[in-house]
């Protein structure tokens, strides 16, 4: 999303995510015509502070030899769908930047801004093209990268969770079909629609995964009812707004993962529902623990962040 560096020695991307008292790391390599491979998935304790932990990782994992990335956290950025500005491609980012003035509560002239195209194939003549505008204040981005700079780990890019989810979802798409993807964790999650590997639409889902795994049957049933209603409304909305994109299935990745969730959702939705299994789309021969679906869901954003497709010149 926000790219900073243009030097890399070894293939693939390394994603580093601070997670409270731990720092998680994933190394993924992908190439044309082959399945992406997860080479490393680790979690390291923060013994003193984040910078000290990153310094230890820099040495132990030779991080200066890789293109590294991390994710902005909730509340540190904004992402919104806006009409595509009617300007030459080279001027789009600046046009979107000034269009955010008065919309965000930080200075747009120094903000980090990126623009993502939304696929319009088959949308019909006369429909207004849209883009996703992703922005973050300079202060928020500097705060996010400060521990890495202090640890002398050069970040090649900083991304946002929606793009990490998009990277995973794109792998499950059927040819010329859209894919709905639901990610839930203990704070809630997001429902995305992707098509041809690009993000088309997204919705925030306010049902925490912990409520779906509640030991109290009544509370769990209430949470499931809210989730089903949210998914039904969102899928119907997708179908109305993007009728030119037939949705082939909904893939769900939930942590903590309640038993039988995909089957239960499938009984109430008009599209097939499948639990995410990365073994269907990625290789990880050196990581047998990733055969566990809850572990995959727990590390979805970490792995998705390392699934970047752009290349960094050496």
Image (cartoon, rainbow, N blue to C red):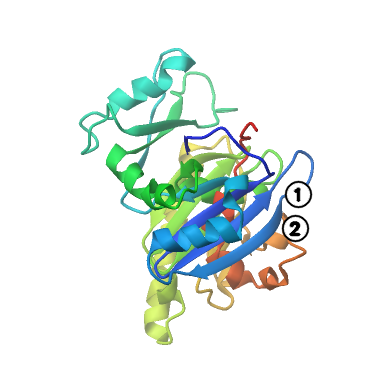
Q: Which mark is residue 283?
A: 2
How many marks the image carries: the answer is 2
Along the viewing direction, whichever of 87 and 271 lies nearer the viewer: 87
Under circle 1, the secondary element is loop
Q: Position of residue 146 (x, y in %)?
A: 37, 48
Question: Could you tell me which residue is drawn at 37 percent across and 65 percent down?
Answer: 49
**Residue drawn at (59%, 27%), measured in percent from left and top?**
121
Query: Is residue 55 left or right of 40 when viewed as pictured?
Result: left
Name which quarter of the figure residue 313 lies in: top right
Please state the horizontal and vertical placement of residue 20, each as a whole percent of the image.
39, 67
Quadrant placement of the C terminus: top right
Q: Are marks 2 and 1 in contact (CB under 8 Å)?
A: yes
What x and y, as percent, mark residue 130?
A: 44, 28
Q: Compared with residue 192, is residue 261 higher up or lower down, i.e. above or below?
A: below
Q: Residue at label 1?
A: 35
Q: Is residue 269 visible?
A: no
Q: Residue furthest bottom?
A: 216
């Amino acid at each position: 999303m926000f790219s900073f560096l243009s030097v890399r020695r070894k293939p693939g991307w390394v994603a580093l995510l601070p997670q409270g008292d731990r720092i998680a790391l994933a190394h993924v390599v992908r190439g044309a015509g082959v399945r992406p491979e997860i080479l490393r998935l680790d979690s390291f304790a923060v013994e003193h502070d984040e910078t000290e932990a990153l310094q230890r990782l820099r040495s132990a994992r030779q991080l200066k030899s890789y293109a590294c990335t991390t994710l902005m956290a909730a509340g540190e950025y904004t992402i919104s769908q806006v009409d595509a500005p009617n300007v030459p491609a080279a001027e789009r980012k600046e046009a979107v930047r000034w269009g955010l003035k008065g919309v965000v509560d930080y200075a747009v002239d120094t903000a980090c801004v990126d623009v993502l195209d939304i696929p319009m194939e088959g949308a019909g003549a006369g429909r207004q093209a849209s883009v996703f505008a992703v922005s973050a204040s300079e202060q928020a981005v500097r705060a996010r990268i400060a521990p890495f700079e202090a640890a002398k780990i050069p970040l090649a890019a900083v991304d946002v969770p929606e793009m990490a989810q998009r990277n995973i979802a794109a792998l499950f798409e059927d040819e010329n079909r859209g894919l709905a993807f639901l990610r839930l964790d203990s704070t809630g999650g997001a429902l995305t629609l992707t098509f041809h590997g690009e993000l088309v639409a997204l919705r925030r889902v306010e049902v925490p995964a912990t409520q779906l795994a509640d030991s109290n049957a009544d509370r769990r049933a209430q949470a499931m009812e809210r989730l089903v209603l949210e998914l039904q409304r969102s899928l119907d909305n997708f179908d109305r707004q993007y009728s030119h994109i037939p949705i082939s299935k909904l893939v769900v990745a939930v942590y903590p993962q309640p038993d039988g969730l995909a089957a239960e959702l499938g009984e109430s939705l008009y599209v097939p529902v499948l639990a995410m299994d990365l073994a269907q789309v990625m290789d990880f021969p050196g990581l047998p623990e990733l055969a566990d679906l809850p572990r995959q869901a727990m590390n979805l954003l970490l792995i998705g962040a390392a699934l970047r497709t752009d290349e960094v010149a050496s």
